[in-house]
Amino acid sequence: MTETAAAQPSAAPAANLERPPDKPWQFFWSMIRFSGWLYLAITIMRIFIFGLVPQISALILREFFNTLSGVSSLGLTPQTIAAAVVALALLINPKTRENEKTLIPACAAVFFSMWLEMRGQQPNIS
């Protein structure tokens, strides 16, 4: 009799399985209650990433095209904006930031964009 009892799976482990909540809002509310600060931080980061980053990139593109048409409000040159965007793209990515072969051109692009900007704004010494 012990052989047949060992061969058949018992029903006890199947009863211990967790089942999803009846209403999805209960699940989400339990997640929020479990770690409220983490949920708040993730919500703020999502607002920043999906709301503000597109706005910032659009403002940079608008300024770039304004400099091409000659109606720039900041007085930047297209070369300065291009060098700054290349430097930013290289320095944001952690893989390129940690690699010395790409870190050197990124730093050079930063200094080149600052040099272009300083060259365009010579002080008057008269």
Image (cartoon, grey):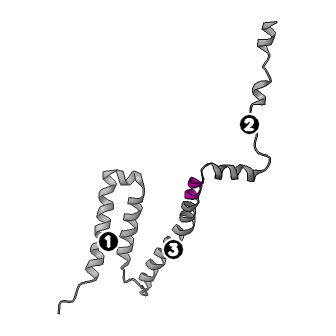
Residue at the spot of label 3: 58
The quadrant where residue 2 appears: top right
Q: Is residue 30 left or right of residue 56?
A: right
- Determine the residue located farthest toward the bottom in the rendered image: 126
Q: How many residues crowd around disc 2 within 10 Å: few (fewer than 14), some, or many (20 or more)? A: few
Q: Earlier in the sequence, mark 3 or mark 1?
A: 3
Residue at image coords 80%, 47%: 22
Task: Locate the N terminus and report the quarter of the image it occupies.
Answer: top right
Q: Earlier in the sequence, mark 1 or mark 2?
A: 2
Residue at image coords 45%, 82%: 66
- Distance from Cα at disc 1 to Cα at disc 2: 58 Å
Residue 74 is situated, as x and y percent measured from the top left of the image, at 39, 83
Disc 1 or disc 2, which is closer to the eye?
2
Residue at the spot of label 1: 113
Query: Residue flagged by tag 3: what amino acid is it?
Result: Ala
Residue 45 is situated, as x and y percent measured from the top left of the image, at 54, 60
Residue at the spot of label 2: 18
The range drawn in magenta is 36-42
Residue at image coords 39%, 71%: 82
Picture disc at residue 45: none
Q: How many residues crowd around disc 3 within 10 Å: few (fewer than 14), some, or many (20 or more)? A: few
Q: Earlier in the sequence, mark 2 or mark 3?
A: 2
Disc 2 or disc 3, which is closer to the eye?
2
